[in-house]
Image (cartoon, rainbow, N blue to C red):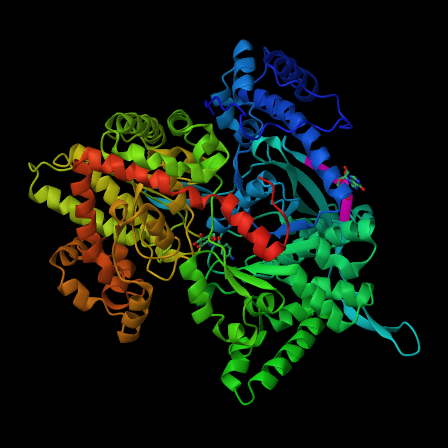
Amino acid sequence: MNVKAEPVHAALETIPAESPGAPRGDDNSSLRADILEKLTYYVGKSTVTASDRDWFVAVALAVRDRVVDRWIASTKATYENGAKRVYYLSLEFLIGRLLFDALNNLQLTDPVRAALEELGVDLDRLRTVEPDAALGNGGLGRLAACYMESMATLGIPAYGYGIRYEHGLFRQALKNGWQQEYPEDWLSFGNPWEFERPEVVYAIGFGGTVEAEATSDVMVRSVWKPAEVIEAVAYDTTIVGWRGRHVNTLRLWSARASHPLRLDAFNLGDHVGAFADRMRAESISKILYPSDETPAGQELRFRQEYFFAAASLQDLVRRHMKVYGDIRTLHEKVAIQLNDTHPTIAIVELMRLMLDTYDIAWEEAWEITQKTFSYTNHTLLPEALESWPVPLIERLLPRHMQIIYLLNAFHLDAARSKNPGNDALLSSVSLIDESQGRRVRMGQLAFAASHRINGVSALHTDLMRQTVFRDLNTLLPGRIVNKTNGITFRRWLHQANPGLTKLLVEAIGPKILDDSMELEKLKPLADDAAFREKFLAVKRANKVALAKVIQEQIGIRVDPSSLFDVQIKRIHEYKRQLLNILETIALYDAIRAQPTRDWNHRVKIFAGKAAPSYHQAKLIIKLANDVARIVNSDPTVRDKLKVVFLPNYNVSLAEAIVPAADLSEQISTAGMEASGTGNMKLALNGALTIGTLDGANVEILENVGDDNIFIFGLKADEVEARRREGIDGTANISNSPILAEVIEAVESGVFSPGEPGRFGSLTNALRHHDYFMVTADFDAYYATQRRVGDKWRDTAAWGRSSILNVAGMGWFSSDRSIAEYAEDIWDVPVRY
Ligand code: NBX
Ligand code: IMP
């Protein structure tokens, strides 16, 4: 960050005197000396032989030392003041790079840059050698990362718990326009941020039997005797809050065999077989499941879920018992947030620990559980709601299955007595689905065990109440609350867009660095022509930088004065990249029909990964690339239209694209995108949104005003009504000459010469099974894109709207979201 951020408001708190390490200086010469020391004695290289990666490690270690002082102080303070702790359980943390997070939040960017300059090393080059920690699929995982940063910023004693996947989300390459997946290897050169904790290790059982043991003449306790035991080893990463005020822990678990090799087999000469158990155990933390929105459904995935839930619970219960010595006070000192249903088995694990280890009576155990847990729902798509076959749970976790049966019996009894004779309600709230083999519904279980269940945008929360959780909401009213998502401005404004941040600080003062609502002060400047010039100059510089990335990555030259029209997110039918591609083709047809008209110049920028087994999504990627090839090589089109698909979308690529976007495509079928967070990042960086009334777009509209956003298309209730009428697209297509021509072009092989049938499954779905309402929304989308084009011609009007977007986005800070969770769900204080 180039911003000179004087800590005028919240001055850095001094590190407590009893801080164990020698205090490390933040001046250039101390930093330079420390970096050199790390390079020499930890990396083992001289300045002559050091590679960029060596320098990166040396810098990371020098910065990490400065974090650790604060980390130990924060942890100690939490112990000393008996504060309630928040545990954020998530199977995904999509963190990205950490160097600039730490530098920026400790205000060390400029001193480290200067120290390195004296050593002849460029900090920005080092930045790019850090691999992304891609331990997540998309929005859900990135949200967890933003929330960790905000919890530290707000001084909430919080732990993130997850899995230390050896391989994060796959690397995407494009081969002839087809997605290819390659394993991701972020740990191959080591990870300077993590602390291995070989002494923090828990036994995790699987399989086996449950036996009844008499504990007295009248009491019997269940004892689970697992057949297989795996070890969970902790790895800690520090999470630094803004201005280094507070530092939290992200604790990720790695799986290890309890017996690394079978000596008997080894001695008999079976050198490979001797390691078989080890391989099997370690497979649990090998790889992140790359499917989002559809549950993976495999046994290994369920083992991952239990592995990390059980390790996390043992760890937090140990910590609680160490300090308070009484499991009955758990809910007073601990709040556990479930990031979607993936960690739901933790609920049953806590019940098991209380019943079988601590001899707590059922009623009381269940009360403590409900007061401790809360659950965030991220999707309503029925196919995305997680459920596990009863026989699988019975086999892997026999004691847990018994507890689930008991929970369900009590739960259904309560439901029956409140709603006698209502069988439909009973089967809808049941924890066990009987419709397709018996399966445990993790959403229902998470709901029943939580005092709060939250949606991630206002619309999504309303739809939760009306659809998936309608009956549960009647049975257990008042638990559903809305906590609209947010993003951390430290990463998505200060770090990603230093140019804009600097301008904002100059224009409205440094307070914006601490209080996102200060951005409102920008509003009057939208009408100030001189400010608009400066603002657009920053955007222009960011676009030049992105154009360079595009040229380097895929060899396509784009004109930075074009409108950069951006759709970056996972590839999904409901997100409707296809709608965008069809409009691109329509625009291409129009340009070819009248090549000499005074067209706006546009660059359509796509990026995103498809789940490896998601056929239609992969075909959409291929279509985007085929359209790109034809359009980009058509001499009649030239700079009027370029289509770009950037491979391997990840957090770091997002940080390059977001500040350079003019138009943000948020065009999901209404009712299907729970919130979206990319929409917030793009608007915060001055992109105007073209979008449906879906997810948090609704709240973006409210905050930026309807003159500064392009809303189109069916609303959620209209989508539902249309679907009831049928989802054949034939009439929509025949009523839209433009769309008809576009689909015919695709079907006739214009973009797939020699293979006209290539996109048949996409076009057939459009014609006869248009569940995602692409044909129904096409004309509205096309017309709205023309309004976008008209506005773009009026630079002053565009600049004004762009500024008003930035000005209106303060509410979308994850500090606001987390403050709401703290107050309404966790009951913990926040410190600004
Ligand atoms: O969570 C996303 C939603 O689609 C977004 O609308 C929302 O903004 C975001 C944060 O609330 N969901 C998501 O990213 N889901 C997954 O990545 C996912 C991963 C694994 C899985 C199911 C869903 N089994
Ligand atoms: P844990 O909370 O037991 O996982 O320990 C994590 C870190 O917290 C330890 O390495 C200590 O630095 C610190 N810590 C643990 N127990 C105490 C305590 O009782 N007082 C202050 N700090 C503690």
* Residue 526 visible in the displayed image: yes
Give the magenta range. Answer: 195-201
Q: Residue furthest bottom?
A: 421
Q: Residue at x 75, y 49 (%)?
A: 274
Q: Is residue 676 left or right of residue 312?
A: left
Which of the 4 image quadrants contains residue 375?
Answer: bottom right
In this view, 740 is above or below 135: below
Q: Nearer the viewer, residue 74 or 271?
A: 74
Q: Is residue 122 left or right of residue 215?
A: left
Magenta part, dominant SS: strand
State whether residue 359 is above or below residue 640. Answer: below
Q: Residue furthest right?
A: 217
Position of the C terminus, as image quadrant, is top right
Is residue 420 in the magenta section?
no
Marks counted in the figure total 0
- Residue drawn 68% across and 20% down? 24
Q: Magenta includes 200?
A: yes
Residue at x 74%, y 73% (from the top left corner): 363
Residue 215 coordinates in the image, percent (x, y)? 90, 72
Query: Horizontal and vertical percent for residue 341?
Result: 56, 61
Q: Nearer the viewer, residue 824 or 240?
A: 824
* Residue 391, horizontal then vertical, whole percent: 63, 72
- The answer to whether one can see residue 260 in this image is no
Image coords of residue 374 (percent x, y): 60, 60
815 lies left or right of 576 = right
